[in-house]
Image (cartoon, grey):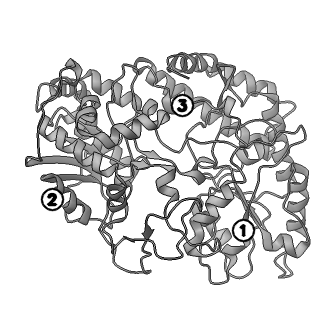
Amino acid sequence: MSVKLSRRRRAAIAGTALLALALAACSGGSSNDSSGKPLPTISGNPAVTLSVFAPQSADWNLATNDFTKLIQQKFNITIKWQTTTFDGGPAKEKRQISLASGDYPDLYLLIPWVDQFTQVDLLKLSQQGVVVPLNQLIDQYAPNIKKALDSTPEWKAMATAPDGKIYGMPQWVDCFHCSYQDKLWMNSAWLKKLGLQQPKTTEDMRKVLEAFKTQDPNGNGKADEIPLSASVGNSLIPYFMNAFIYDPQGTSSGNNDSTLVLKDGKVDLQANKDGWREGLRYINSLYKEGLIDKGAFTQNGDALSQQGNRAGSVVLGSATVLHPGQFVNTGSADGRDKQYDAVPPLTGPSGANYTGYNFPSVPGATFVLTSKATQEQQIQAIKMLDYIFTDPGQINGQFGMEGKGWTQPGAGDVALDKALKPSFKQIPQKPGSKPLNSGWGALAQYNNTAHFRNSEAIGTDIYSQAGYERKLFEATKLYAGHEDKAQIYPFWKVWPDPAQAAELATLQTNIQNYVQQNALQFITGSKNLDTDWDAYVKGLDSLGLKRYLEIQQAAYDKVPNK
């Protein structure tokens, strides 16, 4: 049932939230985790009913889903679903309303890119007695979860609050190609036609883009080529900035939009440094020469895709996106999708040759048990998650049942990482066929280690649809190792102080927006990098940059085993 409330009603709910949350600790079940006493030993799987809040795709029916049926049968659980959509805004609002009203479920099962609990959420809700610590549940009933956390220190650090408690389980998605987002994909067919090599330096890049603009590489006799484009969600700044100064931002990630770095253990900002100005100066020079599409900084992803897929002659020379499918359809009738290859990080005039690194997992939690759950329900729920941590659990959970969503590898199948033995192979669904409703997809994407992901059987032709994932895997090798590990700010294991959360969020939003807006103004020429730079730097100071760095530093200093 959808939830639609007036603005006044939402305000009333928000106003009663603290009272409802305070009372919530007195209702339902509770865990002895905070007392240090062991949980009761329960053999077998006694029948329980579990209310679960989860996002549901328009193509799914979680109540009749094959994996739901498997879980219910395997663990003697009856699941009562409370569903929301895959639209992040409404999904988050519905979750917050359920908490504020006090009528929340036994379990929240979420997807990071839709909505999840933040670290601050978890700390606040733990203080109010709403969420259940998972430590003892994991120790006594979840050997696979315990093994995964113990063998992956970064994951354990991300999951563990400063008080040592695990208030919810975050997903671990060790996506290699997602970790290096500052990629540029260039039309190799155009390079070949013009007798050019892939650019290696910033000046090489300028010459290639000039040739794309002036030498009619698509051969239609028209000056309709777009040398370089991007979109709001796929910024071109990080790729080029890393040839001047280390820029940790991802092309399409919100991980570190405020350009935070570490310098000898001190948190700092890159966007007010001379190297940043020189990077903007270079991008501005490309823009002034008409080598960057004027819509690159304002258009959405659909507009970029329209450029890449424009009917007739190919017009797009290059684009900065995580993967080329974001601007050109795979399996294009004219084969244009096969023309684009990744260009490694450029070397700038001072020798800088960086790429950003984006931690592929999101801190916070997607599996959160509440005080409404009895101990028996908590135990059954953690057993369910523990099964998802096994290879069979996450294969069935993500892709559906064997024979429907996946199959065993056959002779000649090759794992994504050729050094591994292939362990499963997805069954491609025919275009236009009815959705399977067999797996939970990203709801079951927990123990998604590099070994698991890279053992999937993938086609060996990187220019075919079946080999697309291999294309991304191989392309990412061109970027891996160019990140500056010493400067990476480990936001994933930094837990902000809840008392400062609102102040920090305001400062970060204001600074982030200011940096992005001014970068655009400097690049397009509405501000001058010589005459307006000092005022820009002072503007950052007036926005509270010093205080922002102080809060981030204090939070970072509390991180154990840095």
Q: Identify the residue at image location x=18%, y=39%.
A: 379
Where residue 524 sits: x, y (%)? 78, 47
Q: Residue at x 33, y 74 (%)?
A: 404
Identify the element where label 2 is drawn.
helix
Position of the N terminus by quadrant: bottom left
Q: Is residue 528 left or right of residue 56?
A: right
Amino acid type assigned to the residue bearing label 3 in the image: Phe
Determine whether, in the image, residue 157 is placed left or right of residue 57: right
Q: Quadrant of the C terminus?
A: top right
Q: Which residue is mark 2?
A: 73
Mark 1 and mark 3 lie on one chain; the one further toward the N terminus is: 1
Q: Nearer the viewer, residue 59 or 101?
A: 59
Cα distance between the residues tagged 1 and 3: 33 Å
Amino acid beneath label 1: Tyr
Task: Residue 127: give x, y in percent of width and height.
Answer: 28, 21
Q: Where, by quadrant of the figure, is residue 216 drawn?
A: bottom right
Quarter location, residue 356: top right
Q: Amino acid at mark 2?
A: Gln
Q: Is residue 9 visible?
A: no
Query: Is label 3 or label 2 in front?
Result: 2
Could you tell me which secondary element the residue under label 3 belongs to? helix
The tally of labels here is 3
Residue 95 place in picture, x, y as percent? 29, 42
Disc 3 and disc 2: Cα gap in Å? Answer: 39 Å
> Considering only order in the chain, which callout, 2 or 3, is on the residue closer to the N terminus?
2
